[in-house]
Amino acid sequence: MEERPKLRYFDIIPQSRGFILVDPFSISKEMFLSKNSFLLLSLIDGKSTISDIKSKFLKMTGIILSDMEIINFINALDQNFLLYNERFLTKVKEEKEKIKNESFKEIKYLNNLEELRKSIEKKYFEVTKKIKGVIVPHIDLRVAISTYQKFFSILQSVKESKIFVLGVSHFWYEVPFSVFPKNFKVGEKIVETDFELIEKISKLFDYDITSDYFAYKREHSVEFPVLFISFLNENKKVVVSLVSESDIKKLREISQKIIEVLKDLKEDIFLISSIDLSHVGRKFGDDKSYDPEEVDKAYIELLLNLENERAFEFLEKNENKTRIDGKNTNFLFLEILKEFNIKRKFN
């Protein structure tokens, strides 16, 4: 059978003269592609042969490429681990082993952590109500600084000694629900993982929820909450997880397993769901930019009223057209929160 090369996940940054390919896992080197090279890249879909790619490119550009030119282009991508094939998967295994053998997971965002801490602490919001869980974004620190200031004020009010973080798997996952079985290091601070709690949860699953090390290599959805937890004066233990399951029945099964372990620890557990709302515009594949506020507000209102099934179905019905990345994570978050006897929204 003729080879049908397939691309794996990477980020694309548009430039005036072309495009830059950026690897969120830091395995591949950045590559700059001209507009024609990027068009050629887009034809490598895992279904097309070299002959197919050659024919499609000719029809779209009027340019005749030789088989060897296309093969050399594909080989350059392969050498840079940008194809989804055995070479890339072998590299993933090597990276997993590196993370597995490390003493801790180091989180690096800024050179001056103290400066970041001061900007977060710059404004304090008084927390007068008992809060058991919070939904937070994981977008750029500069974009959401006021939101992160509020989040940190809430964190400072947390009396519970254990914080359970539910994140979104953006780039890679091998199991539908996973936890990270390592401590974290932020600057000189070690954020300890609750290994005993992880062990209890793990026993209830029929797959290894601690094996998916590579998914955490550069997963910002869980790194952001841990970063802020590290700023607390009081040490908290964490369980950091990624939710990749998208079937509502299976999500409910996962929640029941977690609840089984947490039910006797309700007074000592605080929950964080780290998600982002709508992703729209040309950067995300839309023909044009538009305001998704109406969708976000409708979704948030369902979450505030703890209507997690309706919130899930709301996004399912419109095929999550605005790309809210918290659908699965928030469902699990609210299922657990309701077991904590949270009956109403906070105003």
Image (spheres, grey):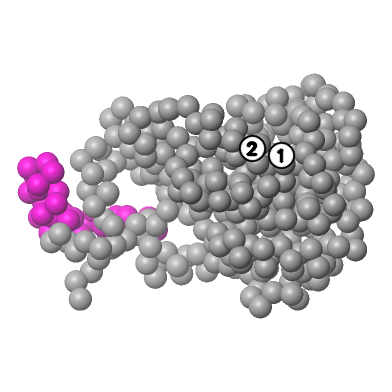
Judge left or right: residue 119 versus residue 19.
Answer: right
Q: Tell me the chief SS of the magenta region.
A: helix
From what the image shows, is residue 309 above or below residue 103?
above
The local secondary structure at tag 2 comes to: helix
Three-letter residue code for mark 2: Ile
Q: Identify the residue at the far top of this view.
A: 123
Q: Is residue 127 visible?
A: yes
Q: Is residue 60 magenta?
A: yes
From what the image shows, is residue 118 above or below residue 42?
above
Q: Residue at x 56, y 51 (%)?
A: 313
Instruction: Assess whether mark 1 and mark 2 are in contact (beta carbons under 8 angstroms).
Output: yes
Q: Residue at x 82, y 46 (%)?
A: 343
Q: Residue at x 15, y 59 (%)?
A: 52
What numbered label is drawn on residue 83? none
Please give the range of residues in magenta.
53-81
User: To which residue does mark 2 refer?
Assistant: 300
**Residue 8, image x, y percentages:** 39, 57
Decide which of 326, 157 is in the foreground and name it: 326
User: To which residue does mark 1 refer?
Assistant: 304
The local secondary structure at tag 1 comes to: helix
